[in-house]
Amino acid sequence: MNRRSFLKTAARAAAGGLAFPCLVGSSVLGSAGTVAPSNRIVMGCIGVGGQGTYNLKAFLGAVEQVWYVANAPKLSKSSVQVVAVCDVDTKHRTRAGDIVNKRYNNRDCATYNDFRELLARDDIDAVTVCTPDHWHGVISIAAAKAGKDIYCEKPLTNTIAEGRAVCEAVKRYGRILQTGSHERSNDSVRFAAELVRNGYIGKLQTIRVNMPVEHGILPPQPVMPVPKGFDYDMWLGHTPWVAYTRKRCHGSFRYILDYSGGEMTDRGAHILDLAQLSNDADSSGPVELSGRGRRPENSLFDTFYKFQFECQYANGVRLLGVSKTPRGIKFEGADGWIFVHIHGGRLEAEPKSLLREQIGPNEITLGRTASHHENFLNSVRSRTQPFAPAEVGQRTGTICHLINIAMLTGKKLAWDPRREQITNDDEANRMLARPMRSPWHL
């Protein structure tokens, strides 16, 4: 019995006024080391490539999550029941289905090519959305409409307009959404943010971001036959139709603007997310942005690989970014600084004594969780907001997209965070959304 079935059965029993004794097994009550069906979350996984498979395994309780949260435990095997996976690549979904079946020692996992078939199942409580970025918005909105809670990889969407549509859908249909910005669930990261927000480094003045770019400049690629078992038209979705070539898809999609935003929306979405958290700007953002960068010429890839940018917040804090090592973020105040390394959350500080401070009971505290995945599951059960809800993902993603727009146009942008509009340039403002290839729409 899954969570939805248990709740429906309980509701019918209550409505029928059952008064006779009922004997139930200990697993229904959640004893003997099991999880009661009312707390077991039934999941489907949409997009099961590299990151999608990692998240699948995390929710199955099959992998340690120590690579970004130190000493994080596995999730309980019985706290989640994965019943279906979906991917437009037969190899991906077959591999993922085998992982699920091996975990449960059965052959029950359903596999789908079309996410709409998975979302149509009424036995699924929540889904992961780990597709290429250009699919995040359409699928997350469809999932919210279908009554599913959502764990959506970062960036939340591939345009600012799509992100706002996701936020509105999640709110309208009463869903829980966790953006996969897992760095903010790291204990050391939350401690660093508490130090900054409580004034341990004095008044925050400058945030410096290092974002090295690791991809090369790929020359134009030949047209290739679409591999058997790969639904390429579905993979393209609402983006313009172009002939297939292998390097366009899967991992390297992130370096093509039609599908992603390059380093800015890849690791940048993690790093800029921490700037938002530590600057107490999760519901807002910068008011002015500018940047310049270089893009490959005569290449399949067209995202920026060398850049520098500047953002100005209404509270006077400046955010300065550059493509260099070490990857991380530095918070500079009047009385000291803290540097957070990405990934892993290792901290450096000056004075070093900052890292021995203890946050007092009457100071700003940001909470802790065993892992980003566990935080999502707890939010699904309690119906409280997770650490990276849709609005947080939207605000962080917005900065990434605006910096890319500033570099594309070569203009300094005036941004109104409340209205989510560029107020000084109509051309740039039109880049907040993109047309969608039929039949797809938000």
Image: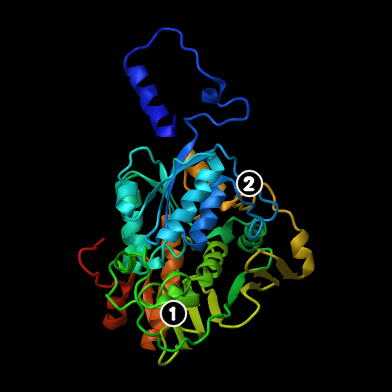
In this view of the protein, which residue sits in the foreground, 212 or 6? 6
Badge 1 is on which residue?
289
The N terminus - image quarter: top left
List x then y, in percent, for residue 80: 51, 40
Q: Earlier in the sequence, mark 2 or mark 1?
A: 2
Q: Which residue is mark 2?
A: 74
Q: Amino acid at mark 1?
A: Leu
Q: Is residue 148 left or right of residue 262?
A: left
Look at label 2 and name its amino acid.
Lys
User: What residue sits 50% from the left and 39% below the top?
Assistant: 106
**Image point 26% across, 81% down: which residue?**
426
Q: Position of residue 69 (x, y in %)?
A: 65, 56
Judge the density around disc 2: few (<14), some (14-19), many (≥20) Cα neighbours within 10 Å.
many
Q: Where does the C terminus fall, quadrant-wise? A: bottom left
The extreme top residue here reads 20
Residue found at the very far front of the displayed protein: 228
Give the structural element (helix, strand or loop) at label 2: loop
- Position of 47 with respect to 328 (left or right) is left
Q: Nearer the viewer, residue 117 or 339?
A: 117
